[in-house]
Image (tube, rainbow, N blue to C red):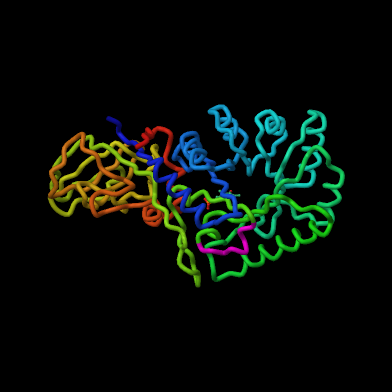
Amino acid sequence: MYRSWLEVSLRQIAANFRAIRKLAGVGVTVMAVVKADAYRHGAVEVSRVLEEAGARWLAVSNVHEGIVLRESGIASRILVMADFLPSSRPLFLEYELTPAIHSLEGVREYERLAVSAGKVAPFHLKIDTGMGRLGTRASAGEILDVLGATRAARLEGLMSHFASAPNYTTAQTDEQIATFTAVLRDLRNGGVDPALVHLSSTVPLAYGRTEAWGNLVRPGHAIYGYVSPAKGAAAPSLLSVQPALSWKATVLEVKDVPGGAAIGYGGIYSTARETRIAVLGVGYADGYPHRLSNKGRVLVQGRAVAVLGAVSMDLTTVDVSGLTVAPGDSVTLLGVDGSESIDAQQIAKLAGTISYAVLCGISSRVVRLYV
Ligand SMILES: *Cc1c(COP(=O)(O)O)cnc(C)c1O
């Protein structure tokens, strides 16, 4: 019995991966993104099940996340997308992790390191096609000059990332694709033809922006059962995936309070009439957003009930008037209960955030069970 716990369906993760592979089709490799502890689903367990389902590439954000997978016996190729610090560079070679390098200086550094280690070291070069975050803005000519001087470091992939993929009311994605295509064409004309070409995370994959798929796609959110809604004239999502994670909490106390009673910190909620309240063993220290104060909904016995007052660090109070609820009962914060359901996108909307932040924000204090 836990105060708050997660139930993760590895079967659903595998089903989501298969649905993604089917959509991507033959000739497009699916690199499953398992950064941030697989969006809190558990990077090791998720990577194992993805490998069993046939994944040959995984992606993480930093070297430490890659090392954890290697030390757990994950043998797939692993792309490290956002960590090329001097201190982490030798670890790429030691653990056979593949860096996304985002500057030409970085390529020269990796070449020096690979030469001195006497190893051939594949890397992916990230270009900034307009997102204005990681990635080189060098011209194809400058890239060719540097690649012409590398022997041990080998360009295996050319990649970029979109800033506004779900927004079909802006031309930014098309502009990014055009910039990428021009650099790739010039590299090929210069005799460099990267084996892997990739730009797409979940959204351009799900909404079928095939001109951005290259021959590899990098979905994260979809692996966990989510596709963000698009804005503007997008075709419907082509991907049928389902959330794999439910989040539950235990009722610690139930009591009837009279009308006019203040509930929780700051007394920001006052009961209008006699109210039965249940106090749950979950709070913002578990990642349940404080912004759900007076706004959230949880599922109890197949019914959606309201969060009353402030979400506090360890406790949250909900309205269970008319229900027979006892300490020890479980409630659903995220998931399905009878005909009712709440997913991370609905929580995000109520809390004024995004579904990614809801999932990644579930703290390590919340026990994770596999079902
Ligand atoms: C996180 C990330 C992804 C996966 O994005 P989703 O929207 O979760 O599919 C892909 N590529 C890069 C570079 C990322 O940082």
In the picture, which quadrant includes the C terminus? top left
Residue 292 image point, x, y percent: 35, 50
Q: Considering only vertical position in the picture, is 201 above or below 324?
A: below
Residue 336 image point, x, y percent: 29, 49
Provide the residue span drawn in magenta. Answer: 207-214
Residue 298 image point, x, y percent: 28, 48
Q: Is residue 74 left or right of residue 258?
A: right
Q: Is residue 249 left or right of residue 241?
A: left
Q: Is residue 341 magenta?
A: no
In the picture, which quadrant includes the N terminus? top left
Residue 100 image point, x, y percent: 68, 44
Q: Main secondary structure of the magenta part?
A: loop
Which of 277/193 is in front? Answer: 193
Q: Is residue 209 magenta?
A: yes
Report the residue at 75% width, 46% height from top. Answer: 155
Report the residue at 48% width, 48% height from top. Answer: 17
Q: How many marks?
A: 0
Report the residue at 84% width, 53% height from top. Answer: 142
Residue 175 picture quarter: bottom right
Q: Is residue 189 left or right of residue 328?
A: right
